[in-house]
Amino acid sequence: SAYKTVMSVKVECVVKERCEIGEGPVWEEKEGTLLFVDISGQKIHRWNPATKQKETVATEKFVGCAVPRRSGGYVIGEGRSFGALDWESKSISTIAVIDEDKPNNRFNDGKVDPAGRLFAGTMAIEERPTVLELKQGSLFSLNKDHIVVKHFNQVDISNGLDWSLDHKTFYYIDSLTYTVEAFNYDINTGSISNRRMVYKMDEGEGIPDGMCIDADGRLWVACYSGGRVIQIDPQTGVRLQTVKLPVDKTTSCCFGGRDYSDLYVTSACKGMDEADMAKQPQAGCVFRITGLGAKGIPANSFTG
């Protein structure tokens, strides 16, 4: 007789040193390391699950994202600049400046598209978590020639993003719309069009934050102040799975590990008082979820 194996989902805290706002996890396949940022802590971290060692580079401004670069090093969204980071020397040089008319803006989440461009969005600097001047942000991309394209403006909090497996759809989250949206995407030009909603957050799910796609084309969304990640089918707009975490401020997620079956989830503790922290001592840590029965796909590297 045939038995169906029921996977048991396990959530463990793996990076125990707290971030103020942990974000933007990226699995680096070659090194077997997890790259992530602490936005307001102004740090970029690289953690090795095999050795449990963490290396850190400090930035001068809030750092929204850091992504691997094919030629070596990283490209980052720091303050209102795209920058190039050399990890060994810890030096950062400016590639391009954006939002020059909005000195109170900063980069938030970013990710490399299937053609090697870096897409990253901006937002106004928060007075406190999720309290900010609205409609100040935009979504940008940086191409290999270091030309910056502004795709649209009027964004509150530019957040999670990823691309469909057939490279025809771009998925995007502007957090305070409480939705996941889709656009037609042209891999050759990097242009996006035909914006539409694919998922509306349910009551109690929190605020949609970071996001990644799995090998079945389903989206995993970290729910800020919802203490969970959800798996949604963007074709049908149906939520397929919910995994709760022991912290409320879950911020972003990415698949990693040898076969991409581990889901790494970042979190935040900024804005929490002592009583909150006593209830959620792991706030700001990085978690690993195993046994989901889903797998991710390798991250793209910036080609310029």
Image: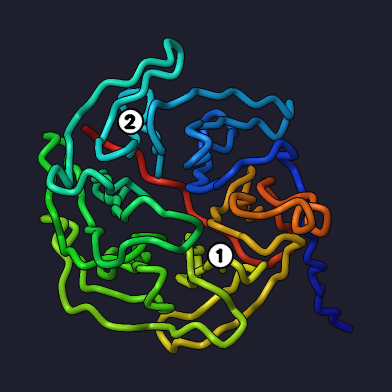
- Residue sticking out furthest to the top: 89
Is residue 258 visible in the rendered image? The answer is: yes
* Of 242 and 226, the residue lying toward us: 226
> On the image, numbered disc 1 is attached to which residue?
222
> On the image, numbered disc 2 is attached to which residue?
70
Quarter the C terminus occupies? top left
From the viewer's perspective, is residue 161 above or below residue 58?
below
Q: In what element is the residue under mark 1?
A: strand
Mark 2: give few (<14), some (14-19) or many (20+) Cα within 10 Å. Answer: some
Q: Which mark is residue 234?
A: none
Residue 243 image point, x, y percent: 70, 71
User: Does residue 88 appear left or right of residue 251 in this picture?
Assistant: left
Q: Kindly report the distance in space between the C-alpha atoms of the residues bearing marks 1 and 2.
A: 27 Å
Quadrant assignment, res 46 = top right
* Of 175 and 163, the residue lying toward us: 175
Residue at point 21%, 67% (across, down): 154
Disc 1 marks a residue whose amino acid type is Ala
Quadrant assignment, res 198 = bottom left
Disc 2 marks a residue whose amino acid type is Arg
Residue 162 image point, x, y percent: 37, 61
Residue at point 59%, 47% (across, down): 256
Mark 1: give few (<14), some (14-19) or many (20+) Cα within 10 Å. Answer: many
Q: Which of marks 1 and 2 is in front?
A: 1
Residue at point 61%, 60% (across, down): 250
Q: Which of marks 1 and 2 is nearer the N terminus?
A: 2
The total of numbered circles placed on residues is 2
* Of 262 and 226, the residue lying toward us: 226
Residue 89 image point, x, y percent: 42, 10
* Of 144 and 154, the residue lying toward us: 154
Q: In what element is the residue under mark 2?
A: loop
Quarter the N terminus occupies? bottom right
Residue at point 71%, 36% (across, down): 17
